[in-house]
Amino acid sequence: MDETQRPRSAIIVGAGAGGIAVAARLAKAGVDVTVLEKNDFTGGRCSLIHTKAGYRFDQGPSLLLLPGLFRETFEDLGTTLEQEGVELLQCFPNYNIWFSDGKRFSPTTDNATMKLEIEKWEGPDGFRRYLSWLAEGHQHYETSLRHVLHRNFKSILELADPRLVVTLLMALHPFESIWHRAGRYFKTDRMQRVFTFATMYMGMSPFDAPATYSLLQYSELAEGIWYPRGGFHRVLDALVKVGERMGVKYRLNTGVSKVLTDGGKNGKKPKATGVQLENGEVLNADLVVVNADLVYTYNNLLPKEIGGIKKYANKLNNRKASCSSISFYWSLSGMAPELETHNIFLAEEYKESFDAIFERQALPDDPSFYIHVPSRVDPSAAPPDRDAVIALVPVGHLLQNGQPELDWPTLVSKARAGVLATIQARTGLSLSPLITEEIVNTPYTWETKFNLSKGAILGLAHDFFNVLAFRPRTKAQGMDNAYFVGASTHPGTGVPIVLAGAKITAEQILEETFPRNTKVPWTTNEERNSERMRKEMDEKITEEGIIMRSNSSKPGRRGSDAFEGAMEVVNLLSQRAFPLLVALMGVLYFLLFVR
């Protein structure tokens, strides 16, 4: 591509975490970027709710996990969280996890405390087994960072690398549920619950979620749970300001009605040429990156006349989606000292509570739920001597597809009564008399306010056929110069994961639309995953005992004969049997999602 063909302008549809991050990255690469946001605020679900009485609530995420991915984003943009005035507050303990009989477990990054907590439930050998579980979580974490979160999967052929597939299968345990895997380390049902409930962050049941996702609770226990002073949106607001310094322009209250194309010329794929706003205004650009919900976008924003888009949109409608939530935002007239910053109330009928959500798309009779008290760690969230409380109750997503919808007003009342009764029964706190104001988000709120298909708050699910090369691509189907960033494209949901995805999308744009040999203005994922870095990581993991290899008989060389022999087998498979396996996987993908 000639320098004259270099893209000069880009439109980002949606100012969620992914849109904000990819906008700043493209601006750093010299692109003139405009971000269009339908609401009057940035951050998407990571926005804040303020009341006239001085209470502040995080509308969506409230736990900052995987802090390294946040730091990587800011460092790639030539700054740091600290330089941008973001102060991260660590939460001690991580949570209070309440059981039905009023007993509780308080996980923490302090190993001395964890030893006492674990041994109360698991006996003298429990802490050793916990450390083994933690080591496996470390393996899931490091392998995912290297091979998933810092790598794009542009097609099914990306899985044709036998070393990659063997690594993913052997290191990530993707075909074993996290519940079953936890049972290998913990003898008691309650500890299995403690170390599996976090799959709700991905909108999945622990009885279905791959064991890979133990990396989430590993991150909590190894790196801590953090909360940005001023609310979670403080991080994204800092990214907005970084982008604005680089020339990014934000237009709020600006809804987009469709993505425009050139219709395809000379037999080539149609190229995105800009967008049409809801008021009829047309904005032209060389690139369009969509941060709106991906399923919503294929159904409502992309031109259906382009070959394959209508069919693919219908396929997406039938893919498994994550859960929704009923979220209560309560202003209290006093304080609730019985509650920590983060509190989990686990259902007595643990599996049934998940089955109700994910199999029947309903509200469980006895739900597990999350209580967040931001004013406990950051007093600025409420007036003096008062608390702000958020109750998040996971529920099934909206049914659609002609199915009769549930009676959501009744379910909201039932959820409220259940949450208040459970808190009082387990902690002794009577919360209801303290509530002076209530705001409620239902699945319909998530659907209308944020254009989330079916009100699914975490986008598409994360089962095996919704991740890696099976997840919707970061480039739009059947189009050029149109890309995605956000929860339902690769690599997946959650703010730190979406920030990693913004880097993947930005680098793909620079690779496909910029002249060859253009220098990317940050350390790229390819550079990060270079052979040198892989060797350094292998040595680090080996030293920490995660991958056990005996020293070779050859001086100065690491690796056992068994490991080298295994790699020879893998190489043989790559030449003969493995292409057949990849072909079969491709056929399976076609039958499930394309045909």
Image: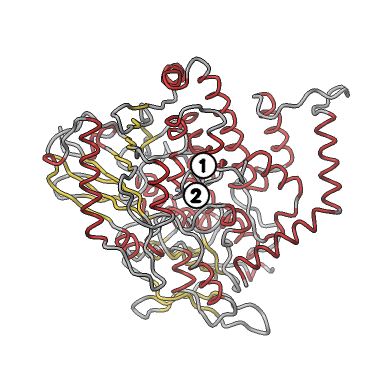
Residue for point 62% across, 52% down: 520
Crowd rating for badge 1 (residues with CA inside 10 Å; few <14, some 14–19, many 20+): some
Q: Identify the residue at the far bottom of this view.
A: 266
Q: Where is residue 209 in the image (x, y as percent from the top left)?
A: 52, 46
Whichever of labels 2 and 1 marks the residue nearer the N terminus, that label is 1
Crowd rating for badge 2 (residues with CA inside 10 Å; few <14, some 14–19, many 20+): many
On the image, numbered disc 1 is attached to which residue? 69
Residue type indicated by callout 2: Leu
Q: Quadrant of the N terminus?
A: bottom right
Determine the CA span between mark 2 and mark 1. Answer: 7 Å
On the image, numbered disc 2 is attached to which residue? 499
The reply to whether dot 2 and dot 1 touch (C-beta < 8 Å) is: yes
Q: Position of residue 413 (x, y in %)?
A: 20, 53
Q: Is residue 330 left or right of residue 521?
A: left
Q: Where is residue 102 in the image (x, y as percent from the top left)?
A: 28, 29
Q: Position of residue 342 (x, y in %)?
A: 33, 35
Q: Tell me the SS state at disc 1.
A: helix
Q: Is residue 361 left or right of residue 475?
A: left
Residue nearest the viewer, comparing 237 with 104: 104
Image vertical order of residue 278 relative to residue 241, above or below: below
Q: Tell me the SS state at disc 2.
A: helix
Residue for point 53% across, 33% down: 183
Residue nearest the viewer, comparing 36 with 258: 258
